[in-house]
Amino acid sequence: MAAITDLSFMYRWFKNCNLVRNLSDKYVFITGCDSGFGNLLARQLVDRGMRVLAACFTEEGAQKLRQDTSCRLQTTLLDVTKTESIQAATQWVRDQVGEQGLWALVNNAGVGLPSGPNEWLTKEDFMKVINVNLVGLIEVTLHMLPLIKKARGRVVNMSSSGGRVAVIGGGYCVSKFGVEAFSDSIRRELHYFGVKVSIIEPGNYRTSILGKEGTVSRMRRLWERLPQETRDSYGEEYFCNCKQVKMY
């Protein structure tokens, strides 16, 4: 009986283990590859023999990535806030993958700033973040879906622990809550086509998402543009506490 149980367990384990074969034939399109997680992922997938289509925001970032990897990685420029840029990138990907389709889309492009107490921010501050992290992610996904469906592939969306608990004000956590909702909805819809949808929720990592400017100078800039009435309502002690908040 024990032997039968062991064999049954091994069969179920082997059946459910997700072994990806023929990595060298599979294409992965990654956004936000200039630095951070996207850059590291592109390098690792190339090292594993996959075909990486890396989208960078700057030519400098694209050139550096090409120099540091191999011919299995190709780059294109992409601004996820511009429809025409997304359309051009989609056609480029279509030309690369041909009839086999796109094995994976990794929506990694994102920004974290401006952030701060919500009352200190403007509508434009919120939209700068939401347009990249959420609206851009949605539009890239919608354009790439025909290619992903063709390959019965997967969508991997970079969310955040801030997509579950709003730890800071501004558009960042708002956008990540939206990423979670969008991912949940398309996961159910795309199951019919054999397409998988996953999210990644990193914690606090010191990436370039927060820019090069320090917390103190960022907060001071927000503080100094506030009306005097608003500054008086918060007081200097509140401002000093905000300057000490660590974002990573």
Image: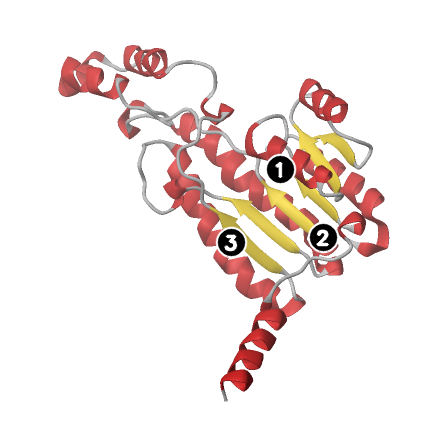
CA distance separating discs 3 and 2? 17 Å
* Nearest to N terminus: mark 1 or mark 2: 1
Seen in the image, is 175 located left or right of residue 243? right
* Quadrant of image for the C terminus: top left
Q: The residue under label 2 is which amino acid type?
A: Trp
CA distance separating discs 1 and 2? 15 Å
Query: Residue at the location (58% across, 49% down)?
Result: 156
Which of labels 1 and 2 is toward the front?
1
Which of labels 3 and 2 is toward the front?
2
Q: Determine whether the residue tagged by mark 2 lies in a helix, strand or loop.
A: loop
Q: Determine whether the residue tagged by mark 1 lies in a helix, strand or loop.
A: helix
The image's mark for residue 183 is: 3
In the rendered image, residue 146, in percent from the top left (x then y), is placed at: 72, 55
Disc 2: which residue: 103
> Can residue 145 be seen in the rendering of this structure?
yes
Q: In the displayed structure, would residue 182 be above or below residue 136?
A: below
> Can residue 32 be seen in the rendering of this structure?
no
CA distance separating discs 3 and 1? 20 Å
Query: Residue at the location (74% across, 31% down)?
Result: 76
Report the number of numbered marks: 3
Q: Determine whether the residue tagged by mark 3 lies in a helix, strand or loop.
A: helix
The quarter of the picture where residue 44 lies is top right
